Amino acid sequence: MNLPARAAASAAGPGVPAAEAVGIHKRFGSTQALRGVDLALRPGQCLGLVGRNGAGKSTLVSILSGVQPQDAGEIRFDGSPAPAPGATGAWRRKIATVFQHSMVVPGLTVAENVFLGRQPLRRGRRLGIVDWRRMREQTRQVMAEWGFEIDANEPCANLTVEQRQVVEIARALAAGTRCLLLDEPTAALERGAVQRLFERIRQLTGSGVAVLYISHHLEEVFEICQDVAVVRDGELVLTAPTAGLSTSDLVTAMVGAQAGAAAVRPAGAAHGAAGRNEPVRLAVEHVSLVSPGTSLIDVSLRVAAGERVGITGLRGSGATTLARVVAGATAPGAGRVLLDGRELPAGRRDVALRAGVGYIPEDRQREGFVATLGVAENVTMTITDLLARFAGVLLPGTRAAAAAPLARRLSVVSAGLGQPAGELSGGNQQKVTVARAVAREPTLIVAVTPTRGVDVASKELLLRALAEAADSGGRPGLLLATDELDDLVICDRVIVMVRGEVFAEFTQPPFGREELIAATEGLTLGGPAGRPDEQEPQT
Amino acid sequence: MSETAYDGPDVSSGPVEAPGSRAAVEAALQRQGRSRSAAAISLIREAALLPVLIVLIIVGTVLKGGTFLSVTNISGIGQQISALGVITVGESLILLIGGLDLSLESIYGLAPMVAAWLLVPAASFGNGAQLNPYLGIGIVFAVGAAVGIVNGLLIVKGRLNGFIVTLGMTILLAGIQDGIVKGESPFNLPGAFGYLGSAYIGKIPVSLIVTAIVFVVVGLFLRYHRIGRSIYAIGGNREAARAAGIKVNRIRIGVYVAGGTLAALAGLMEAGRVSSVTGSQGYGEGIIFSVFAAAVIGGVSLQGGRGNMVGAASGVILLGLIQNILDLINAPNYWIDAINGAVILFALILARIIGGEATAE
């Protein structure tokens, strides 16, 4: 096959970086976001970029992709200076970003999305009439050339998250871009899709495409990146081949001097045993729900006071849906949810809250906080009735006084409690969401993927906060639905769901990663799949 | 937006405090002091229209000096903008919660029409029932609230599109407004019924006092009442508000009812001012356009969750001043709409420039 586009990738010569940042400085108000960052991305290289939330990663990415200008320093592509700031089209031909949130227009076809904004035109280009035939043809070419199997005529609304990501990558490749920024590309993908993505990345880098891989998942960085760059406090503190590094080296580089912060205390065996003598906090009885994508089939489970129960499973397994049902965010088709023996009305989040169910929703952007309102207001949103004085009057001072200790407990970093939550970094937004959930001192905490998209240190802090909440005086139960297996370390018991049913239960921490993964896929290692109670405890 | 841009003072430093502990409260109070400067900035935003208002006052004074600044003229402006002001409060509430209601203009016409029709004698185009005027005032509010409930239920419970529901409702209500009186305009309104719109206390029109009270009460409610804050939360992010246990649907329906009731109150004041109810009151004159213009110029976001009563009031005053100046200088009749529209666009652009990104969306 004739591949002129690929040949162009190395036209600038082998030693010249595809993209290069030299001495980049950037300041926002009183904050020095970047102080002299040098970064080089070679053709064919997959470079991991890691750092805690707020370290300057996002700023660096936005400068590299031309979204905002640097204060000092230079960006170069293939050895020549970057296009002028604001020349979006020119930037896009040099470097393309695939964001966490899909930038695909669902109502348009694959071909239209691939050529979004630069559709091939018919003769007499001035008339601006789209040449559909050529657009489809070229889309098919790009897909075939890179081995992607997506129909050019398919409306993007019909595509999976994974396929939409491929469309975005194809869009960049079709424009001749040979430098890709992948920003948390696996955040919305399930395990199989992640492996396929890695395969594609290897194929891209094999053909000379440069990939900057931004992720909080260090194991992914080790798997796919040849090299890794660590940003901390606006500086590049480490650039090294991944082969010679360990996870703890990376974490140390990310966290800096305070490395080795106490690890999350894993749930001990004693703790787990104690859970069984405690009264039942939550009882889910024969809950069923039929909906497109995810269903629940006769699910029952119990959570004792002070017990921390994890639910995990693949996307669509029903793990998060079950959590939503318990929190009152989704009404089940059948079955009951009882808190301390009292039945909760189906799908009534407001009643569940007052009954004592704290809720950390899956998608914090959509359900976790109100971007336009301040930190204090968001954190106290669940307790306005408790804070209000006469006839519902609620003074801002009262809110601030109630919010301050909560923000402190979760180490929310903000410019003040009045700062709109939408302006905070992702990790801090998640802390606000968690603070909001625990503000009412719930008797049951329902947490759905509470650590998604946050950095290692914040992740630990959030998990510890959840574990501590479950250990506190009121002995609330914790129901943790997550697909991040690392989060399950704080659990006493883990339930694995497959296609809407409870598939396996692990009662003996620590939980083996391989066994958990096998169970989520509906397989059992060393023995037949049994009913939950017959499941062999895992060591 | 950069994640690093806001790494300001670190709230997390220092020991963890129990909620409500003395140290925690003191720390909070300290931070409140810090956020006071932020409050000052937001006040500047709220007052973004102040320069425009001042310019308009100067223009009016230069063009028509004594007449413009006379007590009669100013109280006249006050009376003229009262009705617009009260509907704008209603519409602002609905906009804040992330909705939109076109039918407020028809409520503004229909509610007093139904009451007037039941109050005045047949000779004045009533239906002959000649009800007690106080009962009539009750009917005005009942009609407003009832339409609000229907709108709210259709939009919130029926999950219908608010634009289309209220568009259909507007036309339906305007038709009823004409239909029940066969296109006539009931007059001879009883004194008590017309009091709010026509009476003066000293030189101050009662309608202006009522409007000021409505603005202040709703403004305080939005700022200091938990339901007022819930309105901002729902408008800012409905799903987040729901997940936080706020009774989203109940509050949304309640806001449609409040909007309808306020529009009815505005209609009552307008009926009193002109001492009859005409078929064109509301829908016929297209007052909803002025309502949206006033709210948006005043910084109430059409996306929901942003805006306040100070802004809405300045938007209303701005439109009132423009109207008044155009009247005073005898602007050519056929051109009044064009001038009005141009000034509205100009004010919108100016508000955006002064108020920044967040305003005038």
Image: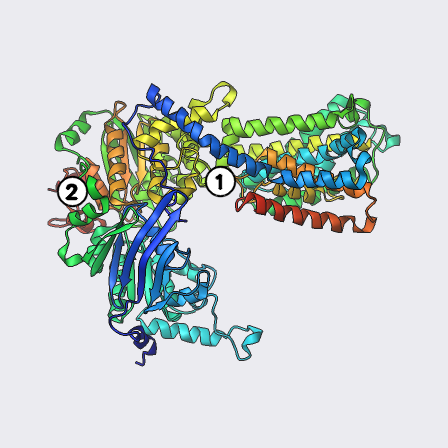
Residue B256 shown left or right of residue B286 in the figure: left
Q: How is the image coloured?
A: rainbow
User: In terms of secondary structure, where does tag 2 sit?
Assistant: loop
User: In terms of secondary structure, where does tag 1 sit?
Assistant: helix
Identity, as a three-letter code, of the amino acid under mark 1: Gly
Residue drawn at (40%, 26%) of the image: B30
Q: Quadrant of residue B26?
A: top left
Q: Who is closer to the viewer here, A342 or A2?
A: A2
User: What residue is shown with label 1?
Assistant: B236
Q: Nearer the viewer, mark 1 or mark 2?
A: 1
Q: Who is closer to the viewer here, B318 or A311?
A: B318
Where residue A41 appears, as percent x and y from the top left, is: 27, 63
Q: CA distance from mark 1 to mark 2?
A: 41 Å
Of the 4 image quadrants, the one containing the C terminus of chain A is top left
Q: Quadrant of residue A413?
A: top left
**Residue count near mark 2 (Cα–Cα under 10 Å), binned few <14, some 14–19, many ≥20:** many
Identity, as a three-letter code, of the amino acid under mark 2: Phe
Q: Are marks 1 and 2 on the same chain?
A: no
Residue drawn at (41%, 41%) of the image: A367
Chain of the residue that carries numbered disc 1 in the rendered image: B
Residue B9 visible here: yes
Of the 4 image quadrants, the one containing the N terminus of chain A is bottom left
Residue A343 visible here: no
Find residue A511 and name its label.
2
Where residue B128 appears, as percent x and y from the top left, is: 83, 28
